[in-house]
Amino acid sequence: MSRYPSPALAAFLTLAAATGVSAQAPAPNLSDPQVAHVAVTANTIDVTLAKYAQTRTQNTQVREFAATMIRDHTAVNEQASALAGRLHVTPQDNSVSQSLLAGAAQARSALEPFKGSAFDRGYMDREVAYHQAVLDALDHVLIPAASNPELKQLLVDVRPAIAAHLEHAKHVRSGLGNGS
Amino acid sequence: MKSPDTRRARLLVALLSAAGLGLAHAGPAPAPRRHVVEIRGMEFHPAALEVAPGDTIVWVNRDIVPHTATADGKNGWDTGILTPSHSGSIVVSRVGGSPYGCKLHPTMRGGVKVRRS
C-alpha cells in the first residue's frame, strides 16, 4: 500500500464534495459567472501546485510534467479570461471555488513534510486524483451547468487536455514505484 | 545499298525514339505537395501521413493548449512549440518512416512515411 494516499484522497474527496460529484448528491446549480470562476480557480490551483513542485522535485519527468501543467493551465485561463471579457461576464466567487481553494491548501500542507522521491509520489498521486476529479466535475457539473454556448464550448474543448494530463500523470506516477 | 535518305530516316526515327524514351523515364518531377495536419482534441488529424521527398507538412494547432510535432530520436525534425491558433512546418527529405509525437503531451502520437516519388 502506498504511504501517501492522503493528498490524492483529500483532493478527490474535496473536489467531489465541492462539486457535488457523487451518485447521491445533486449537482450544484451554478450560474455562468460561477462556472467561469470555478474553471479559472481549478486551473490556477494546478498552476500554483506545479510551481511549488518545481521547487521541490529533482526528478526530470516530474519537473517536465509540472512545466506542462503550468503551460497548459495558464493557456486555458488566458482563453477563459478573454472569453469572459468578450461576453462581459465577471467570474463570481462561490462556495465550490472556496472549497477547491481550501482543498488545495490542505493538499499542499500534506505534501510539505515529504522530500525527494516521497514528495514526487505524493505530488503525482495528487495530480492523478485531481485531474480525475476535474474530469468528473466537467462532465457532471460544469458543462451541464454552463448555459452560454461559448462558455460551454470552452469547457468541452478543455476536456481532452484534462484527460491527456490524467494519462500523463498516471504514466509518470507508475514510473516512481511505491518506495518500498 | 541503302540510300542516304533511308539512313537519315532511320536515324531520325532512332533519335525520336530515344527522345521519347527519355521523356518517358525522366518526365517532370511531381510538384511538391503541401499536407496539413490539424491538432485538435489532443490528437493529430490525420495521425498517419504518407508524403514524398520535397513535400511540406504543416501542423496547425486548433487546440486550447500549446503543442509540438517532434520526430522520435535525437536528431529528428521539430516544429518547436506551437501556441494555440499557430502553425509550424517542415520539408521532408529522407525516404523512410518517422514516428513522432508532442513533446509536451506524451499521449499524442503520429507517423510520417516518406515514400520515393
Image: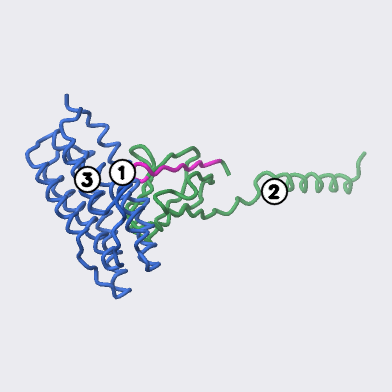
**Vertical relation: A145 (above or below) A2:** below
**Front position among marks 2 and 1:** 1
Which residue of the protein is positioned furthest toward the left in this rendering? A113
Q: Position of residue A164 (x, y in %)?
A: 34, 46
Which residue of the protein is positioned furthest toward the front in this rendering? A24
Whether A159 is among the magenta residues is no
**Front position among marks 3 and 2:** 3
The chain drawn green is chain what? Answer: B
| Circle 3: residue type | Leu
Whether B103 is among the magenta residues is yes
Separation of marks 1 and 3 at Cα, in angstroms: 17 Å
- First reached walking from the N terminus: tag 1 or tag 3: 3
Residue ID at (20%, 45%): A11
Where disc 1 sits, the SS reads helix
Residue ID at (89%, 46%): B6
Separation of marks 3 and 2 at Cα, in angstroms: 74 Å
The chain identifier of the residue carrying mark 1 reads A
**Numbered range of the magenta stretch:** B102-115
The chain identifier of the residue carrying mark 3 reads A
Separation of marks 2 and 1 at Cα, in angstroms: 57 Å
| Circle 1: residue type | Leu
Q: Label 2: which residue?
A: B23
Q: Label 1: which residue?
A: A166
Q: Residues within 10 Å of mark 1 (few under 14, many from 20)?
A: many
Q: Which mark is residue A13?
A: 3
Mark 1 in CB contact with mark 3 (< 8 angstroms): no
Q: Position of residue A124 (x, y in %)?
A: 22, 39
Which residue of the protein is positioned furthest toward the right in this rendering? B1
Where disc 3 sits, the SS reads helix
Mark 2 in CB contact with mark 1 (< 8 angstroms): no
Chain A: drawing colour: blue
**Front position among marks 1 and 3:** 3
